[in-house]
Amino acid sequence: MSTHTTEHRTSQAALDAVATVNTGTFIDGQWGEAASGARFDVLNPATEEVIATVADGGPEDAQRAIETAGRVQKEWAATPPRERSEILRRAYDLIMDRQDELALIMTTEMGKPLAEAKGEVAYAAEFFRWFSEEAVRIGGDQTMTGDGKNRIMVSKQPVGPCVLVTPWNFPLAMGTRKIGPAIAAGCTMVFKPANLTPLSSLALVDILIEAGLPAGVLNVVCTKKASSVVGPWMASGIARKVSFTGSTEVGVRLLEQAAQHVMRSSMELGGNAPFIVFEDADLDRAVDGAVAAKMRNMGEACTAANRLFVHRSVLDEFSRKLAERLGGLSVGDGAQDGTDVGPLVEAKALDKVQELVDDAVAKGATVECGGSRPDRPGFFYSPTVLSGVDPGSQLMTEEIFGPVAPVIPFDSEDEVVEMANNTPWGLVGYLFTQDVDRSFRVSDALEVGMVGLNTGIVSNPAAPFGGVKASGLGREGGRVGIEEFLEYKYVAVPRT
């Protein structure tokens, strides 16, 4: 491990915040060690220092967790909706009360600037508030058959024990986005947070305990080897649903496993988001949108603008303005004042970004700004704008997951729509134009689940988040988010 100067060490305030987090398994309302006694290290990506060790669960822990969820399911499903609602509302208030502490934990384990981490904490809390309101609005329906002989009575019931698996890039919000609707619907859960960023999720557990969540409803097992925990859950026959956010490759494997027990599945998978700037766009607004869509979380987001298509007539001006903005951002430890761009999450991610940039440059791309790693400890990469990107470059077909913006010219609407859709993914697309007809025409033509029209931000708890094609199945958030955790039951009642 590298030798760090004082300014490149984790602050005592951050270490103190991390030290408040329980780092064991959480099964049937009790914190404990993994059955094996093993633990794994959690690093601060800004300093490469070990900041905590976490219980490394395995098959025995997984079995206990899923059996607990199965045993508690019937009782939990019978709780009044208002009771579930109030638990979520209290948890929302507790998260907001502890926003600064939770943000510091998040920044320390995954790197994003503190201001951005505070924004994620508020975003994460809002899922609990949103679903606290949805819990008491689970409805049904009553109608009549066409021949008038039977009443059709439809009710909704919790789907049952759920397997929840979250990624490292939004370590608090991805948990609340799944846990919130599961609690609201009356489902028990087994939860595996990402091993790179488990601390935010583990801190959330204590908040839910304080909010009154009964023992056994939520069971949490962290692990370095996901298959050793998630595999037993999927094969148990107890779990009735899986909700996963992560790569398409892993999502496909989980769908194969889910098929063995015909489990309900929600999959929020990879993306290759197009960002389209037409000749009539407000360029300053488009640059603002590009910075938001590209640089959120250092580009480590499935919603990140991956391919920036700019009309040839405004290409030079847009590229210059974007390079000025990104080149002027401050790179450093997210916990330090004035930092705009934190580190990537791990060395492997850093190496991949450099490989993609090197490949694009070798194929003729020009580096307008950035293009290299700063000379300092930590997994940092300078914000980068590339022009003249060859369509055959790797970064055109792979998620970059870093602060790199490739700019590609286009000449016509039909051409850019074809280029935008030329990908197996379909999570989100961004579109900047002042032509109303074009805005709806292109929004309809893009093969994505979400469109940012003259904005670089689409995520909101009140909106149905999700994609099409290889970007996943189902939606999280919005009025439909709770439906993913409910089954419909129809009762036929003869009219007498």
Image (tube, rainbow, N blue to C red):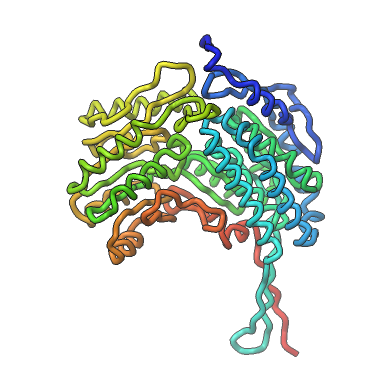
Q: What residue is rendered at 68% in x and 40% in y?
A: 98
In-image side of 199 versus 393 (left or right): right
- Name of the residue lying farthest toward the top: 3
Image: 349 above or below 203? above
Image: 416 above or below 362? below
Q: What residue is rendered at 70% in x and 50% in y?
A: 161
Residue 238 shows in the view = no
Q: Between residues 70 and 75, which one lies in front from this camera angle? A: 75
On the image, the x and y values in percent for residue 488 come to 65, 66
In-image side of 332 versus 86 (left or right): left
Q: Between residues 389 and 102, which one lies in front from this camera angle? A: 102
Q: What residue is rendered at 51% in x and 25% in y?
A: 333
On the image, the x and y values in percent for residue 483 come to 61, 61
Q: What residue is rendered at 49% in x and 20% in y?
A: 378
Residue 369 shows in the view = yes
In-image side of 87 versus 424 (left or right): right
